[in-house]
Image (cartoon, rainbow, N blue to C red):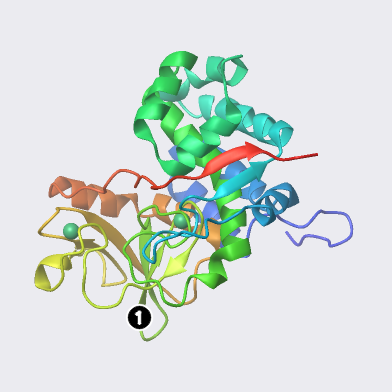
Protein backbone atom coordinates (compact mmCIF):
# COMPACT_ATOMS: atom_id res chain seq x y z
CA UNK A 1 0.00 0.00 0.00
CA UNK A 2 1.24 3.52 -0.78
CA UNK A 3 1.85 5.77 2.17
CA UNK A 4 0.33 9.20 1.88
CA UNK A 5 2.75 11.98 2.75
CA UNK A 6 -0.09 13.99 4.25
CA UNK A 7 -1.75 11.71 6.78
CA UNK A 8 1.02 9.26 7.67
CA UNK A 9 4.16 10.24 9.54
CA UNK A 10 7.34 9.30 7.65
CA UNK A 11 8.45 5.72 8.18
CA UNK A 12 11.32 5.72 10.72
CA UNK A 13 12.77 2.63 9.01
CA UNK A 14 14.66 2.69 5.74
CA UNK A 15 12.97 1.22 2.68
CA UNK A 16 15.57 -1.56 2.71
CA UNK A 17 14.81 -2.44 6.33
CA UNK A 18 11.09 -2.49 5.60
CA UNK A 19 11.68 -4.93 2.73
CA UNK A 20 13.86 -7.14 4.92
CA UNK A 21 11.19 -7.23 7.65
CA UNK A 22 8.51 -8.27 5.16
CA UNK A 23 10.76 -11.00 3.74
CA UNK A 24 11.69 -12.24 7.23
CA UNK A 25 8.04 -12.39 8.34
CA UNK A 26 7.24 -14.52 5.32
CA UNK A 27 10.27 -16.80 5.67
CA UNK A 28 10.46 -17.13 9.47
CA UNK A 29 6.96 -16.55 10.90
CA UNK A 30 8.12 -18.16 14.16
CA UNK A 31 10.55 -15.25 14.63
CA UNK A 32 7.78 -12.63 14.52
CA UNK A 33 7.96 -11.64 18.19
CA UNK A 34 11.73 -11.18 18.14
CA UNK A 35 11.40 -9.28 14.86
CA UNK A 36 8.89 -7.00 16.59
CA UNK A 37 11.44 -6.16 19.29
CA UNK A 38 14.15 -5.48 16.74
CA UNK A 39 11.83 -3.33 14.60
CA UNK A 40 10.90 -1.21 17.62
CA UNK A 41 14.58 -0.66 18.46
CA UNK A 42 15.47 0.26 14.89
CA UNK A 43 12.49 2.61 14.61
CA UNK A 44 13.54 4.35 17.85
CA UNK A 45 16.99 4.88 16.32
CA UNK A 46 15.49 7.55 14.06
CA UNK A 47 14.12 9.62 16.97
CA UNK A 48 15.61 13.15 17.14
CA UNK A 49 16.28 12.92 20.92
CA UNK A 50 19.23 10.59 20.29
CA UNK A 51 20.56 13.03 17.69
CA UNK A 52 20.65 15.74 20.37
CA UNK A 53 22.54 13.48 22.80
CA UNK A 54 24.98 12.37 20.09
CA UNK A 55 25.73 16.01 19.22
CA UNK A 56 26.63 16.75 22.84
CA UNK A 57 29.08 13.82 22.99
CA UNK A 58 32.63 14.85 23.92
CA UNK A 59 35.26 12.69 22.24
CA UNK A 60 38.53 12.09 24.04
CA UNK A 61 41.38 14.23 22.67
CA UNK A 62 43.88 11.58 23.84
CA UNK A 63 42.64 8.79 21.64
CA UNK A 64 45.29 6.39 20.30
CA UNK A 65 45.31 6.01 16.47
CA UNK A 66 43.86 2.48 16.65
CA UNK A 67 41.25 3.38 19.26
CA UNK A 68 37.61 3.60 18.18
CA UNK A 69 36.09 7.04 18.13
CA UNK A 70 34.09 6.49 21.32
CA UNK A 71 37.06 5.28 23.40
CA UNK A 72 37.16 7.52 26.48
CA UNK A 73 34.24 9.67 25.28
CA UNK A 74 31.72 11.34 27.57
CA UNK A 75 28.10 11.06 26.46
CA UNK A 76 25.59 13.37 28.14
CA UNK A 77 22.20 11.64 28.13
CA UNK A 78 18.72 12.97 28.92
CA UNK A 79 18.01 10.89 32.05
CA UNK A 80 14.21 10.81 31.65
CA UNK A 81 14.36 9.77 27.99
CA UNK A 82 17.01 7.16 28.77
CA UNK A 83 15.02 5.68 31.65
CA UNK A 84 11.81 5.54 29.63
CA UNK A 85 13.61 3.86 26.76
CA UNK A 86 15.60 1.30 28.78
CA UNK A 87 12.49 0.24 30.70
CA UNK A 88 10.52 -0.02 27.45
CA UNK A 89 13.18 -2.24 25.83
CA UNK A 90 13.17 -4.54 28.87
CA UNK A 91 9.37 -4.74 28.74
CA UNK A 92 9.09 -5.49 25.03
CA UNK A 93 12.04 -7.91 25.11
CA UNK A 94 10.39 -9.76 28.00
CA UNK A 95 7.49 -10.63 25.70
CA UNK A 96 9.76 -12.08 22.99
CA UNK A 97 10.06 -15.53 24.55
CA UNK A 98 10.13 -17.55 27.78
CA UNK A 99 13.92 -17.19 28.11
CA UNK A 100 13.48 -13.41 28.39
CA UNK A 101 10.52 -13.41 30.83
CA UNK A 102 12.76 -12.44 33.78
CA UNK A 103 13.21 -9.02 32.15
CA UNK A 104 9.62 -8.10 33.05
CA UNK A 105 10.47 -7.62 36.73
CA UNK A 106 13.74 -5.86 35.81
CA UNK A 107 11.75 -3.36 33.73
CA UNK A 108 9.84 -2.26 36.84
CA UNK A 109 12.72 -2.53 39.32
CA UNK A 110 13.77 0.44 41.44
CA UNK A 111 17.31 -0.87 41.27
CA UNK A 112 17.52 -0.28 37.54
CA UNK A 113 20.21 2.30 36.67
CA UNK A 114 19.47 3.22 33.05
CA UNK A 115 22.56 5.35 32.38
CA UNK A 116 24.85 2.66 33.82
CA UNK A 117 23.04 0.10 31.71
CA UNK A 118 23.73 2.09 28.53
CA UNK A 119 27.40 2.55 29.46
CA UNK A 120 27.86 -1.14 30.32
CA UNK A 121 26.28 -2.14 27.02
CA UNK A 122 28.33 0.28 24.90
CA UNK A 123 31.54 -0.74 26.70
CA UNK A 124 30.54 -4.44 26.55
CA UNK A 125 31.46 -4.94 30.19
CA UNK A 126 30.20 -8.49 30.62
CA UNK A 127 31.07 -8.78 34.32
CA UNK A 128 29.24 -5.58 35.21
CA UNK A 129 26.21 -6.63 33.19
CA UNK A 130 26.20 -9.99 35.00
CA UNK A 131 26.28 -8.19 38.35
CA UNK A 132 23.41 -5.92 37.24
CA UNK A 133 21.43 -9.01 36.22
CA UNK A 134 21.84 -10.47 39.73
CA UNK A 135 20.71 -7.18 41.31
CA UNK A 136 17.67 -7.04 39.03
CA UNK A 137 16.86 -10.76 39.33
CA UNK A 138 17.10 -11.18 35.56
CA UNK A 139 18.73 -13.81 33.38
CA UNK A 140 22.26 -12.54 32.58
CA UNK A 141 22.01 -13.64 28.94
CA UNK A 142 18.65 -11.94 28.43
CA UNK A 143 19.77 -8.75 30.18
CA UNK A 144 22.95 -8.54 28.08
CA UNK A 145 20.90 -8.85 24.88
CA UNK A 146 18.34 -6.27 26.04
CA UNK A 147 21.02 -3.82 27.18
CA UNK A 148 22.74 -4.18 23.81
CA UNK A 149 19.46 -3.43 22.05
CA UNK A 150 18.84 -0.42 24.30
CA UNK A 151 22.19 1.08 23.26
CA UNK A 152 21.49 0.88 19.52
CA UNK A 153 19.57 4.19 19.05
CA UNK A 154 22.31 6.18 20.81
CA UNK A 155 25.09 4.40 18.91
CA UNK A 156 23.37 4.84 15.54
CA UNK A 157 22.98 8.57 16.28
CA UNK A 158 26.66 8.83 17.28
CA UNK A 159 27.70 7.14 14.05
CA UNK A 160 25.51 9.50 12.00
CA UNK A 161 27.04 12.47 13.82
CA UNK A 162 30.73 11.45 13.75
CA UNK A 163 31.09 8.44 11.44
CA UNK A 164 32.30 10.32 8.36
CA UNK A 165 35.34 11.61 10.26
CA UNK A 166 36.89 8.18 10.77
CA UNK A 167 35.84 5.96 7.89
CA UNK A 168 38.54 6.88 5.36
CA UNK A 169 41.77 5.67 6.98
CA UNK A 170 40.52 3.01 9.40
CA UNK A 171 41.94 -0.48 8.82
CA UNK A 172 41.31 -2.41 12.04
CA UNK A 173 39.03 -5.43 12.28
CA UNK A 174 36.78 -3.72 14.85
CA UNK A 175 34.30 -0.89 14.41
CA UNK A 176 35.91 2.56 14.05
CA UNK A 177 33.07 4.20 15.99
CA UNK A 178 31.97 1.89 18.82
CA UNK A 179 34.73 -0.74 18.83
CA UNK A 180 32.54 -3.83 18.44
CA UNK A 181 33.33 -6.66 16.02
CA UNK A 182 31.68 -6.55 12.60
CA UNK A 183 28.33 -8.33 12.52
CA UNK A 184 28.50 -9.01 8.79
CA UNK A 185 30.60 -8.30 5.73
CA UNK A 186 29.19 -7.03 2.46
CA UNK A 187 30.68 -7.93 -0.92
CA UNK A 188 29.40 -4.75 -2.46
CA UNK A 189 28.63 -3.91 -6.05
CA UNK A 190 29.91 -5.48 -9.24
CA UNK A 191 33.49 -5.21 -8.02
CA UNK A 192 32.52 -7.02 -4.79
CA UNK A 193 34.25 -4.51 -2.53
CA UNK A 194 34.50 -6.04 0.94
CA UNK A 195 32.95 -3.78 3.56
CA UNK A 196 32.67 -4.67 7.23
CA UNK A 197 29.48 -3.57 8.96
CA UNK A 198 28.77 -2.93 12.64
CA UNK A 199 25.41 -4.22 13.84
CA UNK A 200 25.21 -1.76 16.75
CA UNK A 201 26.11 1.62 15.30
CA UNK A 202 25.86 0.81 11.58
CA UNK A 203 29.46 1.76 10.67
CA UNK A 204 30.83 0.78 7.31
CA UNK A 205 34.56 0.22 6.83
CA UNK A 206 37.18 -1.65 4.83
CA UNK A 207 40.02 -3.75 6.14
CA UNK A 208 42.74 -3.86 3.48
CA UNK A 209 44.53 -7.07 2.61
CA UNK A 210 43.52 -10.58 3.59
CA UNK A 211 43.39 -10.57 7.33
CA UNK A 212 41.14 -11.94 10.04
CA UNK A 213 39.18 -9.12 11.71
CA UNK A 214 39.37 -10.87 15.09
CA UNK A 215 42.97 -12.13 15.51
CA UNK A 216 44.70 -10.13 12.75
CA UNK A 217 46.41 -13.18 11.23
CA UNK A 218 47.15 -12.52 7.54
CA UNK A 219 47.33 -14.70 4.45
CA UNK A 220 45.69 -17.99 3.68
CA UNK A 221 44.82 -18.96 7.27
CA UNK A 222 42.81 -15.78 7.64
CA UNK A 223 40.06 -16.23 5.14
CA UNK A 224 38.80 -19.52 3.84
CA UNK A 225 35.14 -19.74 2.91
CA UNK A 226 32.25 -22.01 3.72
CA UNK A 227 29.57 -21.86 1.07
CA UNK A 228 26.19 -23.52 1.64
CA UNK A 229 25.55 -26.19 -0.98
CA UNK A 230 22.38 -24.56 -2.20
CA UNK A 231 24.04 -21.21 -2.73
CA UNK A 232 26.31 -19.49 -5.17
CA UNK A 233 29.08 -17.32 -3.74
CA UNK A 234 26.46 -14.68 -2.99
CA UNK A 235 26.28 -15.76 0.64
CA UNK A 236 29.19 -17.37 2.42
CA UNK A 237 30.99 -17.64 5.72
CA UNK A 238 34.55 -16.39 6.07
CA UNK A 239 36.41 -18.58 8.53
CA UNK A 240 39.80 -18.20 10.23
CA UNK A 241 41.91 -21.32 10.83
CA UNK A 242 43.90 -19.61 13.57
CA UNK A 243 41.23 -18.28 15.97
CA UNK A 244 38.31 -20.39 14.64
CA UNK A 245 36.23 -17.22 14.29
CA UNK A 246 33.74 -16.72 11.49
CA UNK A 247 32.11 -13.79 9.73
CA UNK A 248 29.09 -14.01 7.43
CA UNK A 249 29.55 -12.36 4.06
CA UNK A 250 26.75 -11.39 1.69
CA UNK A 251 26.93 -9.84 -1.77
CA UNK A 252 24.93 -6.62 -2.07
CA UNK A 253 24.15 -4.24 -4.90
CA UNK A 254 24.32 -1.16 -2.69
CA UNK A 255 25.35 -0.39 0.87
CA UNK A 256 22.91 -1.48 3.56
CA UNK A 257 21.39 1.36 5.57
CA UNK A 258 22.38 1.27 9.26
CA UNK A 259 19.04 -0.28 10.24
CA UNK A 260 19.33 -3.13 7.72
CA UNK A 261 22.37 -4.81 9.28
CA UNK A 262 20.72 -6.58 12.27
CA UNK A 263 17.93 -7.68 9.91
CA UNK A 264 20.41 -9.05 7.37
CA UNK A 265 21.96 -10.94 10.28
CA UNK A 266 18.58 -12.51 11.08
CA UNK A 267 18.06 -13.39 7.43
CA UNK A 268 21.31 -15.40 7.33
CA UNK A 269 20.86 -17.68 10.35
CA UNK A 270 21.46 -20.68 8.09
CA UNK A 271 25.04 -19.46 7.64
CA UNK A 272 25.50 -19.34 11.42
CA UNK A 273 24.29 -22.91 11.64
CA UNK A 274 26.71 -23.99 8.90
CA UNK A 275 29.63 -22.33 10.73
CA UNK A 276 28.67 -23.61 14.18
CA UNK A 277 28.29 -27.15 12.82
CA UNK A 278 31.96 -26.98 11.84
CA UNK A 279 32.91 -25.57 15.24
CA UNK A 280 33.63 -22.01 14.19
CA UNK A 281 32.40 -19.30 16.54
CA UNK A 282 31.46 -15.67 16.45
CA UNK A 283 33.46 -13.92 19.18
CA UNK A 284 31.47 -12.28 21.98
CA UNK A 285 31.05 -8.49 22.11
CA UNK A 286 34.37 -6.65 22.09
CA UNK A 287 35.07 -4.60 25.20
CA UNK A 288 35.73 -0.90 24.56
CA UNK A 289 38.81 0.35 26.45
CA UNK A 290 38.89 3.01 27.66
CA UNK A 291 35.14 2.91 27.78
CA UNK A 292 32.58 5.68 27.46
CA UNK A 293 31.19 7.52 30.44
CA UNK A 294 27.47 8.21 30.27
CA UNK A 295 26.51 11.27 32.32
CA UNK A 296 23.31 13.20 32.99
CA UNK A 297 22.81 15.98 30.44
CA UNK A 298 22.33 19.49 31.86
CA UNK A 299 18.94 21.12 31.56
ZN1 LIG B 1 29.96 0.18 15.79
ZN1 LIG C 1 41.33 -15.19 13.32
Residue 277 placement (x, y as % from top left): 15, 46
Q: Tell me how many marks there are.
A: 1
Q: As displayed, is residue 219 above or below residue 291?
A: below
Q: As displayed, is residue 232 above or below residue 132?
A: below
Q: Is residue 203 left or right of residue 246?
A: right
Q: Image point 66% across, 29% down: which residue?
A: 83
Q: Is residue 32 visible?
A: no
Identify the image quadrant of residue 230: bottom left
Q: Image point 73% across, 52% down: which residue?
A: 52
Q: Quadrant of the N terminus?
A: bottom right
Q: Image point 41% across, 49% down: which residue?
A: 266
Residue 263 placement (x, y as % from top left): 48, 53
Secondary structure of the residue carrying numbered label 1: loop
Which of these two is toward me, 164 or 298? 298
Residue 70 placement (x, y as % from top left): 50, 54
Identify the residue at the far bottom of this view: 191
Q: Quadrant of the C terminus?
A: top right
Which of these two is toward me, 119 or 26? 119
Q: Which residue is mark 1?
A: 192
Circle 1 residues within 10 Å: few <14, some 14–19, many ≥20: some
Q: As displayed, is residue 151 above or below residue 232?
A: above
Q: As displayed, is residue 233 above or below residue 82?
A: below
Amino acid sequence: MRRSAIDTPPDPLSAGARRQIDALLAAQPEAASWLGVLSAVLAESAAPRWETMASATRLSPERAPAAPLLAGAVIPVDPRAAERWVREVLRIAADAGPEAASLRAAAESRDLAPLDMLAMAINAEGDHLDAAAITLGASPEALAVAAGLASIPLLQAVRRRFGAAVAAHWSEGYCPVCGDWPLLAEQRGLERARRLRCGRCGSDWAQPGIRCPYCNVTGHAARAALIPETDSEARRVEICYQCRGYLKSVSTLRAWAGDEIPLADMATVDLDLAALAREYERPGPRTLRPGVTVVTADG
